[in-house]
Image (tube, helix red, strand yellow):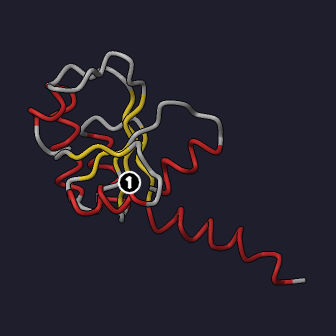
Amino acid sequence: RGVCESLERQGIEHVWGVEVDKHRVALLTDVGINNVVHGDADDYEFWEAQDLSTVRLVMLATPNVDEIINIIKQLRLAGFSGRIAAIAQHDDEREALLNHGADVAFNYYQEVGHGFAEESKHLFS
């Protein structure tokens, strides 16, 4: 949700998310977030059923690095030729994601720490 909202605020069009939990999809729809589809991003058949020809970037924010690696494989098997960004919790996971085809992999804790500091620095005044 946060990624989609941030990209839309920046003027990026045609942003959508994938959610495996049907209940969560319904909750998001109820609060006005209609660009979420139900599906299992870990499933080749899900990606095969999507029109990926206009998709330029897939951002993977799943907490399990093995699942992200599998999703990267499924995307490539389904013919996705765009870019892939992913989130890792540790540097070794970041390297594994890059080695398995992610174009960019962010260390979650480093990024959160940087954002936390940026949002809090005004408190020094």
The kind of residue tagged 1 is Thr
- Kindly give the residue lying farthest to the top in the view shown: 53
* Residue 7 vs residue 115, the one in the foreground: 7
Q: Position of residue 88 (x, y in %)?
A: 35, 58
For residue 98, which quarter of the picture? top left
- Kindly give the residue lying farthest to the front in the view shown: 30
For residue 48, which quarter of the picture? top left
Is residue 40 positioned above or below 79 on the image? below
In the image, what residue occupies the spot 36% across and 64% down? 90
In the image, what residue occupies the spot 18% across and 31% down? 47
For residue 99, which quarter of the picture? top left
* Residue 39 vs residue 123, the one in the foreground: 39
Q: In the picture, which quadrant includes the N terminus?
A: bottom left
Q: Position of residue 61 (x, y in %)?
A: 35, 54
Give the total number of marks visible in the rendering: 1
What kind of element bears circle 1?
helix
Q: Position of residue 70 (x, y in %)?
A: 15, 44
In the image, what residue occupies the spot 36% across and 65% down? 89
Q: Is residue 102 left or right of residue 56?
A: left
Kindly identify which residue carries mark 1.
29
Q: Position of residue 86 (x, y in %)?
A: 37, 47
